[in-house]
Image: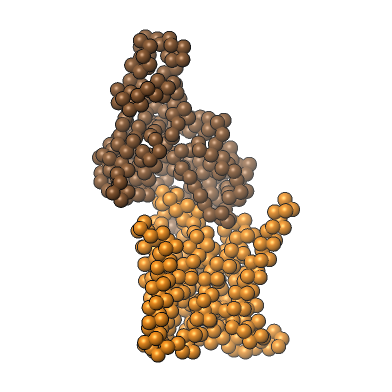
């Protein structure tokens, strides 16, 4: 099942092009890493996909529907790059996580006991139930991130979009979160789209890559990524270092210089 | 003068009813506006109200009823200008305020200068409030209660994080427009209580005091309303006893309440 279809998407901020002629698809079960340097258009792309920015040119379809006609927002869980709620916002962690249920509500948008139960369950799963009664604004950055992840996961979304989810987290929390998302991806076939600067964070979890630098450098699965001439040309001498972070390339321990025959890094590492 | 005698006057009773209604209106709206960092919208719109009131006085119509559409249109102008991405929201507030006061001064001068009626709107004269203005305040409060009943969680989501609210299917544009239009009407009605110079204080101070102590959104709304009504009662009584303008007394009482809540919060933080 195709979850996202993007065709010839372009976007400009004033006169400056942020994205040029991007096309790709995301299917159910894909765990896609979106990578690119600062200012490469990663967050702009996500904002366009979610309708937070209006497209200048091109088409976006979510779950087979044009974005402008798409109403089933409960199918999507979204974790923003940086959430800066008002300092004095009188909402507990529980209240914030429960807001995720809003997309499932008909008028009037009032929460019920089932919403409370689901909120407790998802907070337990994301290890943030212990501080559910604390004010959200008084939590640490990592704790806030877990609550926001709970909010994104509460409706068991078919598409999960995570924009730099690990920025406020220490390395063990990062691994916990990516392990959990990976498990959800495998067990429920949820499509996952993760933006990151650092391939080391997600290398072992993803099965597809989108590499952006205002234009699309690469879009495809992990095996094609390992063998891609576009990737070699784009990353140049850094390519072997990049490949070191990909789990599927671990059969070729580049550091030892002993590449095995058929190894996916063969074309990049220069040891053959 | 004792309280019983004070309450026995018909004009005092009318002033207290109108003041309490307007206190709840500005407090409830103020909680959302303060958290959305839009609290200065009251200041800006009150300046615009000067044009509407001057227009009402020059055309011999009820100045409040003339000012409401003028200020509502201006509030839409602020919203559209701040959304255009060419001007920041504080800039939009400043532009509209300056335009409003300039136009108001021109109209007032053409009408033969400032008269007693215009001055009463500048500094407030709650003791001269009439029945139609009380009914108007009651209708506006009813509209606000209906809006909050149907869109309570949408309003919270928008206040917490507008991007998230949009991806939860909330029509953020519609709710923001309703919020600024109601704020515009509230500002005009509140002019009778505290005057153009101090109306924004009624929107900012009681909600700011409530947000020092509230742990939930509902409690913030209730506390803000309670503080605001208390400020109006103390202010009207003080104004009557000491023969001081009611607006100045009400805002002084509000500030006293704010100082007390800040001290209480600091005390609670030290005790932790």
| Palette colour of chain B | orange
Outermost residue to the right: B271
B4 vs B137, left or right, is right
Question: How far across and down, in percent of the image, does residue B55 sit?
Answer: 38, 83
Q: In what quadrant of the picture does the N terminus of chain A appear?
A: top left
Return the x and y of residue B52 as percentages of the image width and height: 40, 79
Please identify the residue farthest to the front as the structure is shown: A237
At x 36%, y 63%, the residue is B80
Question: What residue is rendered at 55% in x and 67% in y?
Answer: B204
Taking depth in this image into account, of B92 and A72 the one nearest to the observer is B92
Residue A229 place in picture, x, y as percent: 30, 22
- Colour scheme used in the picture? by chain
Q: Is residue A62 above or below residue B85?
A: above
Quarter of the picture containing the C terminus of chain A is: top left
Q: In the displayed structure, does residue B257 sit left or right of residue A73?
A: right
Whether residue A225 is situated above or below residue B123 in the rendered picture: above
Residue A64 located left or right of residue B161:
left
Residue closest to the eye, A25 or B141: A25
């Amino acid at each position: 099942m195709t979850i996202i279809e993007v065709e010839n998407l372009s976007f400009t901020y004033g006169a400056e092009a942020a994205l040029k002629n991007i096309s790709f698809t995301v299917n159910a079960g894909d765990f896609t890493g979106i990578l690119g340097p600062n200012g490469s258009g990663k967050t702009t792309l996500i904002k366009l996909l979610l309708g937070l920015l209006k497209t200048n040119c091109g088409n976006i379809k979510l779950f087979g529907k044009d974005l402008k006609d798409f109403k089933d927002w409960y199918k999507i869980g979204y974790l923003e790059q940086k959430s800066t709620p008002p300092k004095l916002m009188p909402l507990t962690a529980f209240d914030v996580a429960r807001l995720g249920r809003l997309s499932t509500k008909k008028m009037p948008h009032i929460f019920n006991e089932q919403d409370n139960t689901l909120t407790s369950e998802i907070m337990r799963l994301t290890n943030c139930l212990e501080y559910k009664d604390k004010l959200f604004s008084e939590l640490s950055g990592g704790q806030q991130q877990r609550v926001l992840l709970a909010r994104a996961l509460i409706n068991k979304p078919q598409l999960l979009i995570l924009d730099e989810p690990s920025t406020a987290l220490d390395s063990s929390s990062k691994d916990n979160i990516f392990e959990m998302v990976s498990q959800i991806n495998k067990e429920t076939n949820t499509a996952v789209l993760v933006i990151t600067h650092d391939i080391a964070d997600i290398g072992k979890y993803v099965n597809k890559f989108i590499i952006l630098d205002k234009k699309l450098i690469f879009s495809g699965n992990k095996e094609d990524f390992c063998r891609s001439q576009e990737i070699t040309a784009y990353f140049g001498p850094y390519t072997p270092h990049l490949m070191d972070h990909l789990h599927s390339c671990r059969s070729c321990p580049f550091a030892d210089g002993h590449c095995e025959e058929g190894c996916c890094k063969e074309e990049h590492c220069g040891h053959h | 003068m004792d309280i019983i005698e004070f309450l026995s006057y018909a004009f005092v009773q009318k002033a207290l009813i109108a003041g309490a209604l307007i206190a709840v209106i500005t407090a409830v709206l103020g909680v959302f506006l303060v958290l959305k960092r839009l609290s200065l919208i009251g200041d800006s719109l009150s300046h615009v109200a000067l044009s509407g009131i001057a227009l009402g006085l020059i055309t011999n119509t009820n100045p409040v009823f003339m000012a409401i559409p003028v200020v509502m249109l201006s509030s839409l102008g602020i919203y559209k200008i701040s959304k255009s991405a060419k001007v920041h929201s504080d800039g939009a507030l400043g532009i509209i305020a300056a335009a409003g006061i300039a136009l108001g001064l021109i109209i007032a001068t053409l009408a033969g200068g400032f008269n007693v009626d215009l001055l009463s709107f500048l500094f407030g004269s709650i003791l001269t409030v009439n029945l139609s203005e009380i009914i108007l305040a009651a209708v506006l409060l009813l509209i606000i209660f209906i809006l909050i009943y149907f869109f309570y969680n949408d309003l919270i989501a928008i206040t917490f994080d507008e991007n998230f609210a949009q991806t939860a299917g909330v029509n953020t544009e519609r709710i923001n427009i309703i919020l600024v239009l109601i704020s515009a009407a509230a500002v005009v009605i509140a002019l009778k209580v505290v005057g153009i110079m101090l109306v924004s204080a009624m929107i900012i101070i009681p909600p700011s005091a409530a947000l020092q102590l509230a742990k939930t959104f509902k409690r913030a709304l209730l506390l803000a309303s309670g503080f605001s009504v208390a400020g109006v009662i103390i202010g009207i009584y003080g104004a009557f006893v000491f023969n001081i303008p009611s607006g100045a007394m009400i805002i002084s009482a509000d500030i006293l309440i704010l100082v007390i809540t800040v001290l209480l919060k600091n005390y609670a933080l030290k005790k932790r």
